[in-house]
Each structure stands twice: as structure tokens, then as C-alpha cells.
């Protein structure tokens, strides 16, 4: 199939394709999504085919406003309305008990469903015009880093989807925060654009799923099925070096092979780009600017797949604020191969 390239003015075309059961690449503020009509089980099945996604990994539904929660969810706790009020539209997904009209194809048979109200104006317009909840995972081939530009999504999906809408680069750069409201206390399943500190400011106590910060043992099951898969991984193996930035940069400079790729903070670029070095170096952004780092992390991981680097070394921020999401993505890309310096 030929993938139609649409711009933000073509929201009506994108909506028509969704209503007709097709697949559309949609921009969101977090990452690009691979959208289909979330009430059309057959269209949803095509998402799994296009991504090569395991069948037991549920999708989230994108809605234009919080009032739509009642259409697809039941027993909605007060906490959900409080979170929606504080952070929607925005990069937060809530896990809630679902109603029967949500197809099993979306929830992978679970009795809960992930609900998100995105902030990107183009995305909101497309959902509104299509007048259906849009099921959308990140628009990458399963296992690869999520796409934060239309070009990155086309690297994976050209010829596999009906259309893509280019809404510019994503302003957040990591996926939405997933908070499970079906347990007590509420549990963070995936850190993202809304920070743990922000969630706690509204909810009080919030537990953190173990899959967020460490590799699970055999027999342990994360609550978000997607967290168990190797993820965000470029082709070359990644080593994360955690610790104070000057120390982690020095460690990488001392240990990286001549041809190894490096992901580092702005301040240390010159350590790795000397005239003798043939290696690709990706700038994560200034050490003190985690928002900027979040916007660069997936680009950086993805860029090495155009090279033949034998290994990748990465600096990473501390886990305060959106740093928790950045370290989670880096650690997952590294299979939790982390060196503390
Ligand atoms: O920012 C985002 O959330 C992006 C954009 C496109 O909106 N979407 C996204 O979707 O990241 P996806 O499918 O790549 O990741 C959704 C995660 C998966 O790990 C999945 O297992 C989990 O959410 N999930 C979905 N439904 C769930 C449920 N009912 N219970 C627990 N986890 C769920
Ligand atoms: Mg994903």
C-alpha cells in the first residue's frame, strides 16, 4: 500500500480514513502514534500486524475530552477526575475498569483500559472529526525506539499504513505517564511526561511498579504488559553510565572503543568528537535541562541504527522529575546494563 503524506490541514482526510477502518500515523505531544478506530476490532487487529506487536500487549484509547471517559469506563474513581482536571489534555494515561463495548482486541482481554486525552492540537482535531476513540500505540515497529518525527515513523511504517499526518516534532519526546487507578494506592506503571512528583501532588501516595526501575526476574509480571518486552533498543548493545555528569563522561571517555557510539550531555561533546575519533556522538541536551533531554532521547537511540557502531555508551540524568522517564527509557534500551560511577 502507498502511505499518503498529509499535513496538519488534512485532518478531515485523516478522520475519514480512521472512520473507514484504516491506519493513520498521528502526531501527539509525546511520540507519534499508530491510530485506528478503537471500536473497530478489525482495524485494531491491523495495528498489531503493522507493528509486529505481541497480541497480549493492550492498546490505549485516545479521547478528545475527559467527559468521554464515561462512554468507555465504569466505576470511575474521584481520583480519575482529579487527575484529568490537573493534567488533561496532556501526557498522562489512566488505567480504569472498562465497559463491555471496548473490544477485546484493544485491551488484550483485560478488564481494564488505558485512557489518554492528548494535548497536540492536530491530534485533537483528528479525533474530534473522526468522532471515535482512537486506539494508538507508539508508531514504531515493536521493540524499536518510539518515533518523535513523521520521518522517523515513516522509517518503520512506510507502505504499512494508509496515511501519516505530519504535525512537526513532538514537544515532550517520551511517551505518556501511565497511572493505574484500579489498585490502592494508585500505581505508576510507566514514567512519562507527567512526573511522579506531579501525580503525588494530586493523589498523595503513589506506588511505583518494580518494572519501572529494574529488570524483572523470571516469573515476575509487570502490570503494563508492554513493560516486559525488550524495548527502545537500537541494534547495538547499550551501556548506561549513571552518576555525576563529569564523572560519567570521564568514565565513558576512558572505556569506550574508538568506533563506539556515545550519547552525552552538551557540555561533554568535545570530549568525544576530537579529530581522532571516528565515532558518532549524539547530543542529549544540556546536563541541567531534562525537558530537552526527553526530546532527544529517542532520536539519539534511533540514529545509531544508520551506523555500524559495535556498542553505544550513554550518560543519563538523575531520576527526579522527567529524569525518571529518561532513565527508564535508557535503562530499558540497555537491558538494564547500568554502571554507577
Ligand atoms: O504517549 C503515549 O502513551 C503514546 C502516544 C501515541 O499516545 N502511546 C503509547 O502506546 O506509548 P504504547 O502502546 O506504545 O504503550 C502503551 C503501554 C504498553 O506498555 C501497554 O502494555 C500498556 O500501555 N497498557 C495498555 N493498556 C493497559 C492496561 N489496560 N493495563 C495495563 N497496561 C496497559
Ligand atoms: Mg510503545
Image (cartoon, helix red, strand yellow):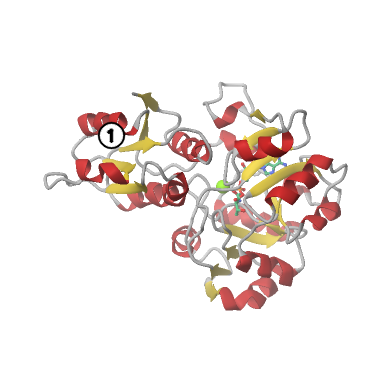
How crowded pointer 1 is (Cα within 10 Å; few <14, some 14-19, many 20+) is rated as many
Q: Is mark 1 within 8 Å of ligand 2?
A: no
Give the image quarter of residue 108: top right
Q: Nearer the viewer, residue 198 or 188?
A: 198
Q: Nearer the viewer, residue 286 or 334?
A: 286
Horizontal placement of 6 versus 89: left or right? left
Residue 108, visible in the rendered structure: no
Residue 223, visible in the rendered structure: yes
Q: Quadrant of the C terminus?
A: top left
Horizontal placement of 278 versus 76: left or right? left
Horizontal placement of 148 versus 188: left or right? left
Residue 114: image location, x then y, percent: 72, 46
Q: Is residue 294 above or below residue 321?
A: below
Q: Nearer the viewer, residue 236 or 254?
A: 254
For image coordinates 54% across by 63% down, the residue present is 160
Residue 66: image location, x then y, percent: 78, 55
For image coordinates 45% across by 29% down, the residue present is 336
* Residue hosting label 1: 249
**How many labels were placed on the picture?**
1
Q: Is residue 335 above or below residue 298?
A: above
Secondary element at image label 1? helix
Residue 297: image location, x then y, percent: 43, 47
The residue positioned farthest toward the left in the image shown:
276
Residue 173: image location, x then y, percent: 50, 52
Q: Nearer the viewer, residue 28 or 216?
A: 28
Horizontal placement of 285 versus 30: left or right? left
Q: Quadrant of the N terminus?
A: bottom right
Amino acid at each position: 500500500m502507498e502511505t499518503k503524506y498529509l499535513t496538519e490541514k488534512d485532518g478531515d482526510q485523516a478522520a475519514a480514513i480512521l472512520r473507514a477502518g484504516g491506519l493513520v500515523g498521528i502526531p501527539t505531544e509525546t511520540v507519534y502514534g499508530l491510530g485506528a478506530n478503537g471500536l473497530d476490532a478489525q482495524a485494531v487487529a491491523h495495528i498489531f500486524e503493522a507493528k509486529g506487536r505481541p497480541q497480549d500487549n493492550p492498546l490505549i484509547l485516545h479521547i478528545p475530552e475527559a467527559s468521554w471517559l464515561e462512554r468507555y469506563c465504569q466505576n470511575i474513581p474521584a481520583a480519575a477526575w482529579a487527575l484529568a482536571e490537573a493534567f488533561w489534555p496532556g501526557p498522562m494515561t489512566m488505567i480504569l475498569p472498562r465497559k463491555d463495548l471496548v473490544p477485546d482486541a484493544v485491551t488484550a482481554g483485560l478488564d481494564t483500559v488505558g485512557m489518554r486525552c492528548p494535548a497536540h492540537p492536530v491530534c485533537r482535531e483528528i479525533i474530534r472529526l473522526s468522532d471515535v476513540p482512537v486506539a494508538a500505540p507508539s508508531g514504531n515497529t515493536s521493540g524499536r525506539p518510539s518515533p518523535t518525527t513523521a520521518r522517523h515513523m515513516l522509517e518503520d511504517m512506510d507502505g504499512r499504513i494508509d496515511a501519516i499526518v505530519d504535525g512537526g516534532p513532538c514537544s515532550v519526546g517520551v511517551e505518556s505517564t501511565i497511572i493505574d487507578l484500579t489498585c490502592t494506592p494508585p500505581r505508576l506503571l510507566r514514567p512519562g511526561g507527567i512526573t511522579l512528583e506531579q501525580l503525588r501532588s494530586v493523589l498523595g501516595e503513589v506506588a511505583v511498579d518494580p518494572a519501572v526501575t529494574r529488570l524483572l526476574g523470571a516469573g515476575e509480571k509487570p502490570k503494563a504488559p508492554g513493560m516486559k518486552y525488550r524495548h527502545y533498543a537500537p541494534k547495538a548493545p547499550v551501556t548506561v553510565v549513571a552518576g555525576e555528569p563529569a564523572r560519567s563522561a570521564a568514565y565513558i571517555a576512558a572505556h569506550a572503543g574508538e568506533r563506539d557510539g556515545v550519547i552525552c550531555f552538551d557540555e561533554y561533546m568535545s570530549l568525544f568528537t576530537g579529530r581522532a575519533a571516528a565515532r558518532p556522538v549524539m547530543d542529549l541536551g544540556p546536563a541541567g535541562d531534562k525537558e530537552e533531554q526527553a526530546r532527544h532521547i529517542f532520536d539519539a537511540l534511533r540514529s545509531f541504527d544508520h551506523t555500524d557502531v559495535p556498542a553505544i555508551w550513554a550518560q543519563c540524568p538523575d531520576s527526579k522529575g522527567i529524569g525518571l522517564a529518561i532513565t527508564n527509557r535508557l535503562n530499558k534500551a540497555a537491558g538494564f546494563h547500568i554502571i554507577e560511577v
